[in-house]
Amino acid sequence: MNLKTYLQTKISEAAKLADLTPDFILITSSKDEQHGDLSSSVALSLAKTAKKPPIEIAEKIIHYLDKNDEFIADIFVSPPGFINFKIHSSYYQSLVTEILKSGDSFGKTDIGVGKTANVEFVSANPTGPLTVGHGRQAVLGDTVANILEWHSFNVTREYYFNNAGRQMRLLAESVEARYRELIDGDVNFPEDGYQGNYIKEIASDILNELGKDLKNGEELFRKKAEEAIFNDIKSSLNQLGVIHDQFSNEKTFYETGAIDKTISELKGKELIYEADGATWFKTTSLGMDQDRVLIKSTGEPTYRLPDIAYHINKVERGFDFIIDIFGSDHVDTYPDVLAAVGALGYNTDHFKVLIHQFVTLLKKGQKVKMSTRKADFVTLKELIDDVGVDVVRYFFIMRSMNSHLNFDLDLAADQSDKNPVFYLQYAHARICNIIKHGESLGVNPHANFDASLLNHKAELELLKTTDQFTDIMEIAYKTLEPQGIANYLQDLATKFHKFYSECRVITDNHELTSARIALINAVKVILSNGLKVLGITTPERM
RNA sequence: GCCCCGGUAGCUCAGCUGGAUAGAGCAACGGACUUCUAAUCCGUAGGCCACAGGUUCGAAUCCUGUCCGGGGUACCA
């Protein structure tokens, strides 16, 4: 049972009796205990249409509310017209049993039962190691996938990459140049080539493995480079706990003829024209501000064309929910792609595109400009080795994806033991330790308990916070923004630590001990459920 | 020029479908370990929520404009 929904129903019924019809009944948790436990501003929002002072409206609504409700202890109005509810402690106390009963699945919903979702993320082309910037997307995407799984969706984590275009050709040329350089010492490096040391390593591996007689422009250079870099990418992702279920690439869409089909279908819709030797997509006729090139005058498609074919492919695979996660450098490109998919008669209503802003890296107070080509980057691997997986994951989800965040590498390494993630984990470890301590004294952690003994202020505060978890998880689903979960868990941990400092769990009072053990077990359930969705470990000791 | 994000405490950022006195962490300062873990707790200090208008009972939150920062505006991805 959800208390807010319950109150919304009650208020709505009362409003009806008072001849009022609110559009929406907002219920918020009160910050100040003078305002009870929960408050509603309905009366304030009704004031305009009802043309009456909010207080009067509030009084009227209250008049029709049942004063002997099983959960509501008190209802009162306070200026300028809020309706405040004081909730019986028994309601909060009853949560302990409910949470323990549901355990691992406390807070889950069946919103996505029988539905499939596809989350595409990272999708970096295999031209170099993943950087810190990719890390943000990796963590965001994986967590969004976790949130959907939490709500019972069957989720496919997908990685799409371009392996047929100019970038990969340039990569192959760079590797070959390093290969020739190793053999005869001549440096004939392509302009705009990839300059990182990893290119030299790949070249040297190729030399060791296949000898020095490879032909000019040999396909193996590309293939070996792609393979090596992909292994590196996958291992960085695995380190982060991110595992993709499916890798898709543009090459397959050439091979299956999907690309040709896409272009001919667009032609059929008269959305294609030739100009300056290139093939253009008439995006302007779909309401965009400029047309885009699909096939360059060189005959080579731009990334947009395979992207369109790929998105059609995703629709055809029948997912109920398709999520694309892009960096802000793609803001301008996805509308074209979706417009094309839509124009060809495919449904695009079930697409959701999440755009995240970039991470600005600071090293010794200086901005680090990231460029894969110039080999100017800090790899994700380096970061993880530096501060650890949990810190990296937490850092990237504790902030809104819309925020351009500054990441000071020196500070991160320096302060890794002060990172807020440890605060959460410490709460979990503390609980585990208390339980263990109790057991060593013969306290059964699963004994029957009387929750009505949990009357201390710190206990009730803690319980009230546990009541918000379900809401938080549902909001996370609706917005697909994970940072609310991180913020919530932070709050829960704070309430727990406060409780810990004020209430001793294991005492001679057996009844109270059992009740408090049950309470902290319940808190542990929520911490662990939440951290699991964030992909962060729950240590039993620290 | 145009489009998308952002501008909140010294720093990094929450809060944004409008709600009561704007929050956290870090940094600073002062307290609390003979106790189930001090990776904790308690307290002090720190703010024209970029700026200017507007909308209304009420604006950090919505609208308009300005300024500053990031990204895009490619026959790169």
Image (spheres, coloured by chain):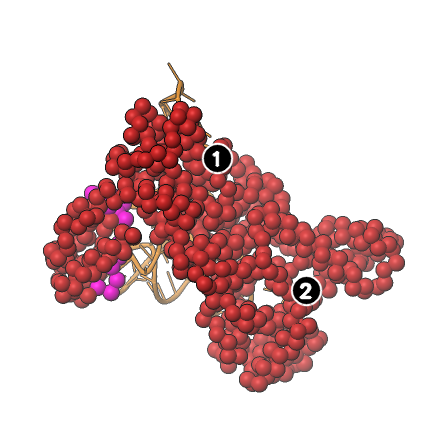
Chain colours: A red, B orange
Q: Residue at x 22, y 45 (%)?
A: A87
- Compare marks 1 and 2 and give the one earlier in the sequence: 2
In this picture, residue A476 sits left or right of residue A23: right
Residue A290 location (% of width, % of height): 53, 76
Q: Amino acid at mark 2?
A: Asn
Per the picture, the main secondary structure of the magenta-coloured stretch is loop
Residue A335 location (% of width, % of height): 51, 70
Q: Residue at x 64, y 53 (%)?
A: A233
Q: Is residue A31 magenta?
A: yes
Q: Residue at x 71, y 58 (%)?
A: A226
Determine which quarter of the picture holds residue A60.
Answer: bottom left
Res A290 visible:
no
Q: Is residue A79 magenta?
A: no
In this picture, is A278 found above or below A108?
below
The Cα atoms of the two marked residues, 1 and 2, are separated by: 44 Å
Mark 2 lies on a secondary structure that is: loop
Q: Amino acid at mark 1?
A: Glu
- Label 2: few (<14), some or many (≥20) within 10 Å? some
Identify the subunit bearing mark 1: A
Residue A33 location (% of width, % of height): 23, 42
Residue A274 location (% of width, % of height): 63, 83
In this picture, residue A510 sits left or right of residue A487: left
How many numbered discs?
Answer: 2
Mark 1 lies on a secondary structure that is: loop
Identify residue for label 2: A163
In this picture, residue A477 sits left or right of residue B19: right
| Span highlighted in magenta in the image | A22-37
Identify residue for label 1: A540
In this picture, is A266 found above or below B36?
below
Determine which quarter of the picture holds residue A216.
Answer: bottom right
- Label 1: few (<14), some or many (≥20) within 10 Å? some
